[in-house]
């Protein structure tokens, strides 16, 4: 869960630059490409996400973030892509450091490097059939970017990879009924491998715990029974395949059993209903609610469980350049926490999340942003040290952006992240401030 906190901060650091690139000097019909360069100074008082004050490491630093994108729009087909590179240099970061979780000495670079590639495609086959696809490829060390659901708690050195791709086919069956077929694939691969699984204390690697491929296929039937309201009935099938191929623990069920990464493999069935409603032209809300049936078919005890699935959102565009967005989600997610009990292993978490975001145009040139997120997660299975225990995550980000013209802007911001947990060693808090400039063309 520390990852959520870290990610909230890092996302807040990056959001302003992306917003500036999209809103100033972006691609147009005459110029289908755009480029931007962001340079920031920052201070991070806990860049290693340590829970003990003695292990906290702080540093001033500089971030350099160039980005280039292209956008092509046709009558039937539209395509866009963007590549962003980030180098964050920490002036006071130690090159040798003791991991606050494993207590092992490890090499620490004075700079973090990340690469992000985004692409999207939309194509209309006819008036009734269309297809859209989105893909994001990321290489990073920050857990908040690699695990946007906030399931990881510490940064990981190396070129850790995440790819998230979605494709949807829309078929207008009648004037009021639409069929949507979708598929999402998520691939996560950590460079940190070879954790210690010696009994009775084990420290499995991130690769052993979190390397995986997720498949999710869904079919939604959408019925526009009123001009401003759409009803939804849907089904989704999901597979989580943990492919780290490493031992992650030893259990007794009742004989000694070496547990590997794929012990947490699962299959899920979601059934849900929903509504999308336009209360006003500028006020839109949606709700989806149902149940998730999960089978951990590869665990030593072949566990099965049922849990609720909820996704609520509300967006209000109250004036030009200003909006409020609120939401709530409840679902199961992977976790970097793991333990072995007498009759089960830690399989995942069940998480409730409340979030809010406000963007307000104080003046035509001065834009304010406020983002908040609270997340409450409960561990499922394993020993009494984990099973039923909870993590609480609170993230807060605030920033101001001043646009001198369509090509140049300045920004200042602050991010506060805090995690409290019933599990020892997972608590931490983090403060970050930044000041920078973005040039766009």
Image (cartoon, helix red, strand yellow):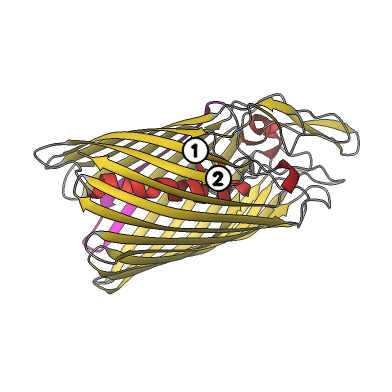
Q: Position of residue 315 (x, y in %)?
A: 35, 67
Task: Let me know if residue 171 is in the magenta part.
Answer: yes
Measuring 44% from the left and 51% from the top, which residue is drawn there? 12
Quadrant (top left, top right, bottom left, bottom right) of the C terminus: top left
Measuring 43% from the left and 54% from the top, which residue is drawn there? 413
Can residue 246 be seen?
no
Dominant SS of magenta comes to: strand
Mark positioned earlier in the residue sequence (1 or 2): 2
Q: Position of residue 152 (x, y in %)?
A: 62, 43
Asked which secondary structure carries label 2, the reply is: strand
Magenta residues span 158-179
Other-residue count near label 2 (Cα within 10 Å), few / some / many at <14 / 14–19 / ≥20: some
Residue 141 circle label: none
Other-residue count near label 1 (Cα within 10 Å), few / some / many at <14 / 14–19 / ≥20: some
- Give the Cα separation between the discs numbered 1 and 2: 8 Å
Asked which secondary structure carries label 1, the reply is: strand
Q: Position of residue 116 (x, y in %)?
A: 40, 34
Give 67 or 174, whichever is nearer the viewer: 67
**146 relative to 335 in the view: left or right:** left
Can residue 39 be seen?
yes
Q: Are marks 1 and 2 in contact (CB under 8 Å)?
A: yes
Residue 44 circle label: 2
- Direction right: furthest residue: 255
Instruction: Give the residue at mark 1.
Output: 61
């Amino acid at each position: 869960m520390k990852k959520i906190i870290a990610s909230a901060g890092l996302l807040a650091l990056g959001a302003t630059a992306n917003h500036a690139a999209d809103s100033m000097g972006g691609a147009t019909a005459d110029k289908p490409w755009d480029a931007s360069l962001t340079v920031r100074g920052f201070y991070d008082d806990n860049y290693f996400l340590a829970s003990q004050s003695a292990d906290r490491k702080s540093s001033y630093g500089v971030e350099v973030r160039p980005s280039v994108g292209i956008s092509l729009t046709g009558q039937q087909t539209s395509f866009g892509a963007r590549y962003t590179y980030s180098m964050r240099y920490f002036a006071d970061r130690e090159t040798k450091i003791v991991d606050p979780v494993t207590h092992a000495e490890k090499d620490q670079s004075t700079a973090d490097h990340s690469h992000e590639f985004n692409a999207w495609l939309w194509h209309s086959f006819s008036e009734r059939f269309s297809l859209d696809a989105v893909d994001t490829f990321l290489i990073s060390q920050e857990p908040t970017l690699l695990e946007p659901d906030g399931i990881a708690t510490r940064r990981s050195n190396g070129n850790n990879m995440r790819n998230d791709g979605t494709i949807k086919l829309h078929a207008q069956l009648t004037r009021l009924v639409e069929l949507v077929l979708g598929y999402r694939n998520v691939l996560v691969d950590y460079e940190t491998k070879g954790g210690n699984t010696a009994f009775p204390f084990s420290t499995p690697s991130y690769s052993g715990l979190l390397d995986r491929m997720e498949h999710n296929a869904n079919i939604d039937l959408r019925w526009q029974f009123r001009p401003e309201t759409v009803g939804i009935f849907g089904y989704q099938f999901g597979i989580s395949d943990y492919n780290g191929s490493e031992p992650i623990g030893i259990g007794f069920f009742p004989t000694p059993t070496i547990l590997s990464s794929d012990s947490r493999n699962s299959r899920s069935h979601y059934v849900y209903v929903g509504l999308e409603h336009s209360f006003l032209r500028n006020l839109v809300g949606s709700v989806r609610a149902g149940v998730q049936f999960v089978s951990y078919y590869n665990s030593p005890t072949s566990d099965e469980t049922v849990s609720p699935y909820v996704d609520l959102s509300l967006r209000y565009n109250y004036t030009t350049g200003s909006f409020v967005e609120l939401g709530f989600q409840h679902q199961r997610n992977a976790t970097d926490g793991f333990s072995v009990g007498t009759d089960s292993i830690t399989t995942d978490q069940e998480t409730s999340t409340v979030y809010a975001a406000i963007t307000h145009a104080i003046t035509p040139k001065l834009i304010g942003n406020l983002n908040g997120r609270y997340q409450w997660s409960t561990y499922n299975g394993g020993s009494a040290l984990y099973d039923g225990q909870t993590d609480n995550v609170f993230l807060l980000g605030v920033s101001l952006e001043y646009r001198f013209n369509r090509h140049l802007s300045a920004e200042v911001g602050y991010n506060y992240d805090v995690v409290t947990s019933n599990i020892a060693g997972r608590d931490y808090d983090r403060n970050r401030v930044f000041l920078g400039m973005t040039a766009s063309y």
